[in-house]
Image (cartoon, grey):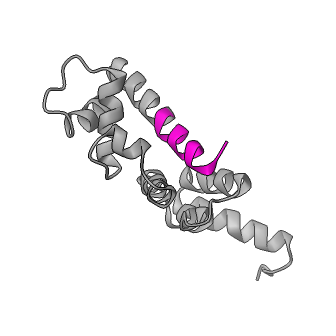
Amino acid sequence: MTTTSTQIEFFKREAKRLFKEVLAGNPEAKLRVSRVLKNSTNISLMRVQHAIAVESGFLKWDALISASEFDLRRAVTRCKNRTATPLGIFTRGTGIIPATPENEALADMFDKMTMEEQRQYLDEDARRKGWLVHR
């Protein structure tokens, strides 16, 4: 699978996830979709894909599908960084060079932590490696 198709798969998964949340009645998901769609009744997966494309900086889903690899990488990075912490963004990288699966997993872990939890994690890691001596 090429990098481009992997990035397109990311957006397909994101659309399916958002569509399920809308069907489940999640108010945040409904608000997200209604910001893009003029008529937010009878929401289908296709319409949610359109909303995802517009949120990601494309005019429509077809424009996302036919975008360059660079534009897709940038869009994936922006999309992932909606809830990212600075440490998660740093670990994930700029998106110009795709992050390794290990770095993606680490960045996702950081994004779920508070800033204090991140600091403690880094302090413990530095202590284990002998880089930090507890005073």
Task: Please give left or right for residue 72 compared with residue 28 in the image.
Answer: right
In the rendered view, tell whether residue 57 sits above or below residue 25. below
Q: Is-magenta flag for residue 2?
A: yes
Q: Nearer the viewer, residue 52 or 116?
A: 52
Task: Please give left or right for residue 84 compared with residue 35 in the image.
Answer: right
Task: Please give left or right for residue 5 compared with residue 12 in the image.
Answer: right
Q: Is-magenta flag for residue 45?
A: no
Q: Measured from the top left, where is residue 107 in percent x and y?
A: 61, 57
Q: Measured from the top left, where is residue 22 in percent x and y?
A: 33, 24
Where residue 111 sits, quadrant-wise, is bottom right
User: Residue placed at 46% from the left, 29% from the top?
Assistant: 17
Q: Pick the quarter of the image with the C terminus.
A: bottom right
The kind of secondary structure the magenta stretch mainly shows is helix
User: Residue placed at 20% from the left, 40% from the top?
Assistant: 35
Where residue 47 sits, quadrant-wise, is top left
In the rendered view, tell whether residue 52 sits above or below residue 47. below
The stretch in magenta equals 1-12
Q: Nearer the viewer, residue 38 or 60?
A: 60
Q: Pick the quarter of the image with the N terminus.
A: top right
Q: As drawn, which residue projects farthest toward the left?
A: 38
Q: Is residue 26 visible?
A: no
Q: Is residue 105 visible?
A: yes
Q: Measured from the top left, where is residue 21 in percent x and y?
A: 39, 25
Give the tally of numbered discs. Answer: 0
User: Residue placed at 36% from the left, 33% from the top?
Assistant: 49
